């Protein structure tokens, strides 16, 4: 069953490169690292990995445990578009492999429209065009996308849906998705997610600080120079 998830994610990665979803090598590397962290979180030593193994029925037949997975993407970042692109493909690849994966936009949230939270996992939720032109990626334009006019980080019903999932796959890019804010909220609410925790995420958002931490601990890293915005 673990192999099923591995295949799903590498299928997704292949699709991203084949369909030229990435415009730069940096974007491609970022997606690869996200997938790597997810697989690492499901290593044989991880308690979560047990959920992916075969379960025995009373008649000694074997069945798969289908995980409920939220693929969390989008948000308010200027990298919103590539996040949605990778999130859609990851969600669809997981569902093709039998997992109950659903795409959720961090900022826009999800309108239940009479559904229960559990019923959200019945659909991939990847049919909407949530992209925004790069020419209008500003806070003001993104804020207009939310019908109720609110601007908080988590959109409607996002936390409730994430709490109902077995695990949240973080496909967020930039700012709020990588600086530890989302991870800290999940830790407080007991939501399992992929990748680093809030402290590591917050530290690595500051590249100079990250370098200094590595040097302090004797970890080899390339030389660097710090430049201020006004230099």
Image (cartoon, grey):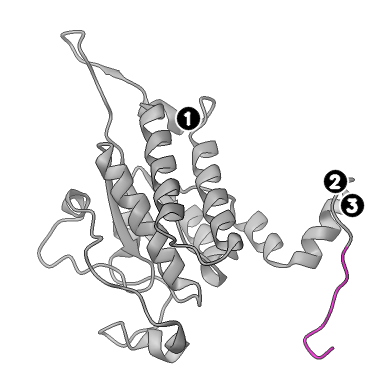
Crowd rating for badge 3 (residues with CA inside 10 Å; few <14, some 14–19, many 20+): few
Write down the residue under mark 3: 216
The mark found on residue 183 in the picture is: none
Q: What element carries label 3?
A: helix
Measuring 46% from the left and 49% from the top, which residue is drawn there?
193
Quadrant position of the C terminus in the picture? bottom right
Distance of label 2 from label 1 (alpha carbons):
29 Å
* x, y percent for residue 40: 55, 37
Write down the residue under mark 1: 47
Q: What element carries label 2?
A: loop
Query: Can residue 229 be seen here?
Result: yes
Quadrant position of the N terminus in the picture? top left
Q: Foreground mark, 3 or 2? A: 2
Between 67 and 124, the one lying in front of the other is 124
96 drawn magenta: no
N-terminal label among 1 and 3: 1
Distance of label 3 from label 2 (alpha carbons):
8 Å
Which residues lie in the magenta part? 224-231
Crowd rating for badge 2 (residues with CA inside 10 Å; few <14, some 14–19, many 20+): few
Residue 116 lies, with reference to residue 35, above or below; the image says below
Write down the residue under mark 2: 219
* x, y percent for residue 99: 28, 39
Residue 159 lies, with reference to residue 51, above or below; the image says below
Measuring 29% from the left and 71% from the top, which residue is drawn there?
156
Q: What element carries label 1?
A: helix
Measuring 32% from the left and 51% from the top, which residue is drawn there?
91
């Amino acid at each position: 069953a673990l192999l099923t998830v591995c295949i799903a994610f590498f299928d997704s990665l292949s699709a991203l490169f084949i369909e030229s979803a990435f415009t730069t090598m940096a974007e491609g590397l970022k997606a690869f690292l996200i997938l790597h962290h997810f697989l690492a979180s499901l290593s044989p030593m991880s308690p979560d990995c047990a959920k992916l193994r075969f379960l025995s029925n009373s008649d000694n037949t074997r069945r798969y445990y289908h995980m409920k997975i939220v693929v969390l993407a989008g948000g308010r970042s200027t990298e919103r578009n590539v996040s949605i692109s990778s999130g859609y493909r990851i969600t669809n690849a997981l569902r093709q492999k039998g997992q109950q994966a659903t795409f959720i936009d961090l900022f826009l949230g999800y309108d239940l429209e009479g559904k229960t939270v559990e019923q959200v996992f019945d659909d991939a939720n990847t049919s909407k065009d949530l992209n925004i032109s790069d020419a209008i990626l500003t806070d003001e334009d993104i804020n207009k996308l939310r019908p109720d006019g609110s601007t908080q980080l988590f959109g409607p019903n996002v936390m409730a849906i994430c709490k109902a999932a077995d695990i949240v796959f973080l496909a967020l890019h930039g700012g709020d998705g990588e600086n530890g804010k989302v991870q800290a909220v999940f830790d407080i609410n007991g939501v399992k997610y992929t990748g680093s925790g809030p402290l590591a995420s917050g530290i690595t958002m500051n590249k100079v600080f990250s370098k200094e931490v590595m040097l302090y601990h004797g970890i080899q890293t390339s030389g660097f120079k710090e430049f201020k915005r006004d230099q």
